[in-house]
Image (tube, helix red, strand yellow):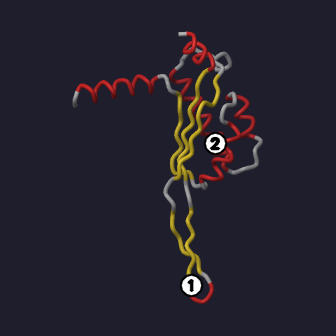
Amino acid sequence: MGARKRNTADLRKAAAKSRYQAILRNCPTSPRKMRLVTDLISGLDVNKALDVLKFSSQEASRRMEKLLLSAIANWQAKNEGVRLEESNLYVKLVHVDGGRALKRLQTAPQGRAYRVRKRSNHVTLVLDSKINEVEKTSN
């Protein structure tokens, strides 16, 4: 491995240590429906986002709630001894990508067949602390 490649890999590893995220892959919901839920919580505080997801009637909100709880657990694993209430965590970024589509056939009239695409998605949720934002801007 070259020096430049090693340096960029080291920088990427250092950035990953201060990034608190959770990834949900191959979620069997269409990306369009998942984006409706992610738009509800992006930029909100973590506790408020959990409340919004808990009382939302959409099926995708249950999966997003579990993903948000997983991201909070990842934050707690990297920040032992720090209280969640004092950290001012918020949802910094929620990104939805299309996943693999299962292609099926549905019978149609006169011997034809229609294609049915059962879509899935990948969701990346990133948390950040408002305290860290203030420290970064002051430097």
Residue holding disc 1: 112
- Mark 2 and mark 1 lie on one chain; the one further toward the N terminus is 2
Amino acid, disc 2: Met
| 102 versus 108 height, above or below | above
Residue holding disc 2: 64
Find residue 126 and report its horizontal and vertical position in percent. 56, 32
Find residue 138 and report its horizontal and vertical position in percent. 57, 10
Find residue 83 and report its horizontal and vertical position in percent. 63, 17
| Residue at 54% across, 17% down | 80
| 122 versus 86 height, above or below | below
| Residue at 70% across, 34% down | 50
Q: Is residue 77 left or right of residue 50?
A: left
Q: Secondary structure at mark 2?
A: helix
Q: Is residue 5 left or right of residue 26?
A: left
- The CA distance from mark 2 to mark 1 is 38 Å
Amino acid, disc 1: Arg
